[in-house]
Image: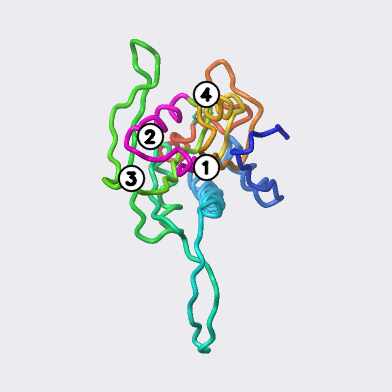
Amino acid sequence: MHDLPSNVICLPQTNQLEALLTIIRDKNTNRGDFIFYSNRIIRLLVEEGLNHLPVVEKAIVTPTSTKYEGVGFKGKICGVSIMRAGESMEQGLRDCCRSVRIGKILIQRDEETALPKLYYSKLPPDIDDRYVLLLDPMLATGGSAIKAIEVLLSHGVKENKILFLNLVAAPEGIEAVTKKYTELKIVTASVDKGLNDKKYIIPGLGDFGDRYFTLP
Ligand code: URA
């Protein structure tokens, strides 16, 4: 296990999670199963992410006419998916948060500079007043994540109100993001060994977007 910065939360490596990860890592897993088991991990990530949102005391009365001193979420949230692979995580967020607003960011490598470039963004107008669950299943070099975070900050989102959720992270990506941003939180299901020369995560699971959206 890697030593992780304090703003990185790795889900508990239970047998169940390990079994789910094993299925989606397997190159012989078909698309239907890949989607089903990825969705289960996404659900775990969203639930863990929600644990890191602040709550305030909230008193209610139960049907037994008894007062109950509980809590309620303090602020408003929204999701922002990094297209295309991040869109796979939108339904998991909707399943946990009814009528959640979800924005989108498209970042691609600029052909000339080879640097990540923003091509499109559509964000909730009041995003500066919200906690943002940033969605991207694979944190590889961190290039697009850093660009997406820059976009959020430029729209007035506070860094400490960003939760970046991903299924598999490379140490290189974690280092790049956390060196630049110390106040946001990363929630991941697995920290893998590293990147290969094509910048794929090793052992990883291949191209997440292709396996979720296109491959047979
Ligand atoms: N994106 C992917 O889909 N897979 C990787 O391994 C790295 C980035």
Residue 119: image quadrant is top left
First in sequence, mark 3 or 4: give its number.
3
What residue is disc 1 on? 30
Q: How many marks?
A: 4
- Residue type for callout 2: Leu
Vertical position of residue 169 compared to residue 18: above or below: above
User: Going by the image, does 28 lie left or right of 92?
Assistant: right
Q: Position of residue 139 (x, y in %)?
A: 52, 31
- Do the residues bearing badges 3 and 4 touch, measured as CB atoms within 8 Å? no
Question: Between marks 1 and 3, how big is the CA–CA gap?
Answer: 37 Å
- Residue type for callout 4: Thr
Question: Between marks 1 and 2, how big is the CA–CA gap?
Answer: 38 Å
Residue at image point 56% right, 41% down: 29
Of the two numbered discs 1 and 3 in the rendering, the one whose residue sits closer to the viewer: 3
Q: Quadrant of the C terminus?
A: top left
- The front one of 158 and 146 is 158
What residue is disc 4 on? 141
Tell me the element at label 4.
Answer: loop
Residue span colored magenta: 143-164
**Badge 3 density bin: few <14, some 14–19, many ≥20, Cα 10 Å:** many
- The answer to if 40 sits in the magenta stretch is no
What residue is disc 2 on? 153
What residue is disc 3 on? 127
